[in-house]
Image (cartoon, rainbow, N blue to C red):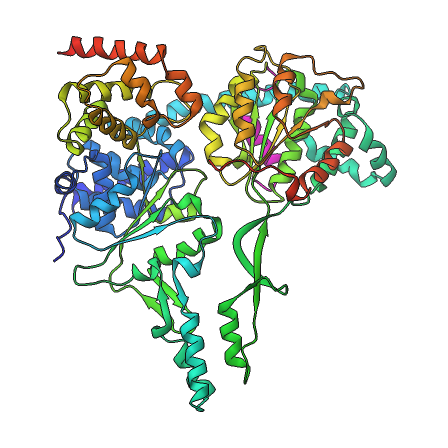
């Protein structure tokens, strides 16, 4: 497509570069490559800086892709024989990942064999076959059983049940309208259309505000103290994410990870696989305060903006003695429509909020529920579907 | 008469700086491409870094009409694209009834004609005047909801709008489109794919100083150097909302109004509200923290000179 030989090389290089950035996860299709070649012709190959920004404007479309692009660009365009080197550099990391995976699955399969319930999500596919014999009464027993006490088989059954779980949608009125029979507001557009159809009168048509559910943000603790529950909650989050739009999921232990995109895959195994790949701090310590701070500073404005409901899943046990937690909880509760705290510890009778973390969180939440078995997850739907009037509205940010 | 579209990146930079907009070369590159390739420019960045300003400057520098669509929740076709003038339609119907000549076919054709159409920003942007196609600014797209975004897809890829009663209206020349977003939510990839993306960052110290002296020509030299250095330091602090360029300019203006020629702790404490907009942030910086930063700034400036 390009005549001059020098430009021919550039076109080819842009194509290779596009392949490189595509392989690290940027969405660069052939259309973009053609655009890029055209753009480089327009700007001319004056300086590397111009080339950088030309390709940047076309290949990047999210803030968090900047870093990846920057690295890829510098590696690729500063070194002519880059493809070979890249391949060399990439292979070992791939191998490490696989080693990790194998290590993990071996450990987990051992755990499964001994009846321990630390199951790994991507082994469910085998377990699910049991479900054919899963009777209704089994289900009933299962509903009240603590996740902690469940056998591997029961865990698999519970996961299957969670897959079926749907949250009834709490609706809030939006500023859009839909047709309505009740006589609140005249819909002029349809009235006028109707007027032309009827012979001698103008029949009024009405409209009312459309209802829509608010965005839902889930923050789930995956630290060591929560390890019995966190896998279950991942299934829960996956089920919810695939049931409704505008859902964002984060997990935290010692640091915060956004797994919303990973959970959007329909296939649960694939989706949990991707999330576990992204999360680096499984079953470690907890730093609730600093994780919430990260959430408040980097994410809250982006995911809580349209009056979101926030679900915080944690036991409130904090390694940092609740340092700075109160302040962050305050900020969080101020920027959500409603803050719901799910705590598996609550199941113990006579539970008293003694831990510092719990004391710091408690004053700022609108609801405080237990989640330790299927029944409690199902009860959640009640909380979420409550009438809007009972809910406090945050001052808009 | 309209000014011709600049032929290269340096011309773009010159064009912008003639209108008192100091841009990075990266922004100029993207802007140049957007003008040349006829693709919308999608600007993301924190509040107050000059995203909206670029559209205004572009329209005045190129001598084009500026059509602005401010987005908000619930923005719909009626307020963004077109609306029928209902009262006039009703009167028209009534009048033709009174005249006794009610011919249904005729009437409906008559009532739903361009004469009764109220054009909203997107519709207006499809029209060129003597100066050429206008600059269309779609401001704070993240404030509207997904259904509207989906609607924009059609407008932005073909620059045409379909009105059932009239037909399809197509732009003779596509407008220059600038979309801004504060990232209060992610815009869908399908829309971004049709645009050129640029992240507008906080400016470097030199550039910010240049901006301050360009926008406030009368400002004291020492004061401007100090306040820019102070704001730059503040951006390294752990704050909920970092001050943007707009805040720097406000602050500089405030200090000039107070006849300050040099920064001091008292002046900072009294005017901190122009710079920081969250009580937590103000409480954190107010007093000793501000004094400490000021000391650092003064030491560094003394060393540099």
Is residue A255 in view? no
On whether residue A279 falls in the magenta region, the answer is yes
The percent coordinates of residue A119 (x first, y second) are 69, 25
Residue under the image location 12 percent in, 42 percent down: B11
Q: Which residues are magenta?
A: A265-284
Residue under the image location 50 percent in, 80 percent down: A196
Image vertical order of residue A257 relative to residue A6, above or below = above
Tally the marks.
0
The percent coordinates of residue A124 (x first, y second) are 69, 32
Q: Is residue A161 left or right of residue A37?
A: right
Depth order, front residue of A238/A320: A320
* Residue furthest bottom as drawn: B100
Depth order, front residue of A266/B99: B99
Image vertical order of residue B95 relative to residue A363, above or below = below
Q: Is residue B66 left or right of residue A153?
A: left
Residue under the image location 17 percent in, 59 percent down: B131
Place residue A61 in its image quadrant: top left
* Residue furthest right as drawn: A137
Q: Is residue B66 left or right of residue A119?
A: left
User: In which quadrant of the rendered image does the C terminus of chain B lie?
Assistant: top left
On whether residue A276 falls in the magenta region, the answer is yes
Residue under the image location 52 percent in, 26 percent down: A331
Place residue B234 in its image quadrant: top left
The percent coordinates of residue B222 (x first, y second) are 15, 18
* Residue furthest front as drawn: B258
Is residue B291 in view? yes
The percent coordinates of residue A47 (x first, y second) are 17, 33
Depth order, front residue of B132/B260: B260
User: In which quadrant of the rendered image does the N terminus of chain B lie?
Assistant: bottom left
Place residue A339 in its image quadrant: top right
């Amino acid at each position: 497509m390009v005549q001059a030989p020098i430009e021919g090389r550039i076109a080819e290089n842009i194509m290779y570069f596009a392949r490189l950035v595509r392989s690290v996860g940027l969405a660069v299709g052939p259309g973009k490559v053609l655009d890029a070649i055209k753009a480089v012709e327009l700007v001319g190959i004056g300086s590397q800086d111009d080339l950088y920004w030309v390709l940047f404007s076309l290949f990047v479309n999210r803030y968090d892709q900047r870093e990846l692009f920057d690295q890829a660009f510098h590696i690729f365009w500063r070194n002519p024989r880059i493809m070979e080197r890249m391949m060399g550099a990439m292979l070992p990391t791939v191998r490490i990942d696989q080693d990790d995976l194998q290590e993990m699955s071996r450990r987990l399969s051992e755990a499964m064999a001994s009846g321990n319930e630390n199951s790994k999500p991507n082994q469910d596919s085998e377990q699910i076959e049991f479900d054919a014999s899963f009777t209704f009464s089994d289900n009933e027993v299962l509903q009240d059983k603590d996740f902690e006490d469940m056998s591997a088989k029961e865990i698999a059954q519970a996961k299957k049940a969670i897959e079926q779980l749907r949250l009834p949608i709490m609706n809030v009125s939006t500023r859009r309208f839909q047709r309505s029979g009740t006589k609140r507001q005249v819909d002029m557009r349809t009235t006028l259309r109707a007027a032309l159809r009827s012979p001698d009168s103008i029949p009024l048509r009405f409209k009312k505000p459309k209802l829509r559910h608010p965005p839902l943000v889930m923050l789930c603790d995956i630290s060591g103290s929560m390890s019995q529950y966190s896998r279950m909650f991942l299934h829960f989050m996956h089920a919810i994410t695939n049931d409704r739009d505008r859902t964002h999921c984060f997990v935290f232990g010692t640091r915060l990870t956004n797994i919303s995109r990973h959970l959007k895959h329909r296939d649960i195994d694939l989706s949990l696989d991707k999330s576990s790949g992204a999360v680096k701090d499984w079953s470690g310590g907890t730093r609730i305060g600093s994780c919430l701070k990260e959430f408040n500073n980097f994410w809250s404005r982006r995911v809580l903006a349209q009056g979101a409901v926030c679900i915080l899943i944690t036991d409130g046990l904090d390694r940092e003695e609740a340092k700075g937690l109160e302040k962050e909880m305050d900020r969080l509760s101020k920027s959500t429509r409603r803050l719901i705290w799910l705590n598996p510890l609550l199941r113990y009778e006579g539970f008293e909020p003694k831990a510092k973390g719990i004391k710091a969180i408690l004053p700022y939440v609108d609801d405080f529920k237990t989640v330790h078995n299927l029944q409690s997850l199902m009860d959640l739907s009640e909380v979420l579907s409550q009438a809007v009037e009972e809910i406090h509205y945050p001052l808009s940010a | 008469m309209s000014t011709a579209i600049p032929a290269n990146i340096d011309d773009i930079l010159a064009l912008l700086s003639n209108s008192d907009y100091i841009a990075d070369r990266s922004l100029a590159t993207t802007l140049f491409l957007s003008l040349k390739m006829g693709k919308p420019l999608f600007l993301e960045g924190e509040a107050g870094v000059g995203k909206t300003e670029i559209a205004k400057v572009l329209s005045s520098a190129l001598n084009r009409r500026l059509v602005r669509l401010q987005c908000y929740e619930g923005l719909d076709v009626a307020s963004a694209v077109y609306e029928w003038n209902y009262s006039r339609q009703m009167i028209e119907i009534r009048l033709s009834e009174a005249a006794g000549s009610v011919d249904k076919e005729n009437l409906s054709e008559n009532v739903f004609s361009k004469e009764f159409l109220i054009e909203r920003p997107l519709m207006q942007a499809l029209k060129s005047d003597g100066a050429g196609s206008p600059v269309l600014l779609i401001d704070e797209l993240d404030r509207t909801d997904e259904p509207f975004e989906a609607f924009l897809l059609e407008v932005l890829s073909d620059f045409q709008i379909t009105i059932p009663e009239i037909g399809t209206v197509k732009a003779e020349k596509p407008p220059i489109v600038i979309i801004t977003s504060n990232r209060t939510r992610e815009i869908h990839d399908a829309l971004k794919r049709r645009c050129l993306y640029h992240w507008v960052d906080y400016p470097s110290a030199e550039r910010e100083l240049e901006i301050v002296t360009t926008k406030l020509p009368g400002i004291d030299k020492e004061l401007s150097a100090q306040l820019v250095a102070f704001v730059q330091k503040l951006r390294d602090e752990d704050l909920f909302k970092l001050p943007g360029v707009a805040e720097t300019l406000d602050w500089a203006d405030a200090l000039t109004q107070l006849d300050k020629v040099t920064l001091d702790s008292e002046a900072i404490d009294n005017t901190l509200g122009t710079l920081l907009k969250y009580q937590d942030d103000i409480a954190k910086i107010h007093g000793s923290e501000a004094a400490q930063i000021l000391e650092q700034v003064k030491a560094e400036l003394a060393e540099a000179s």
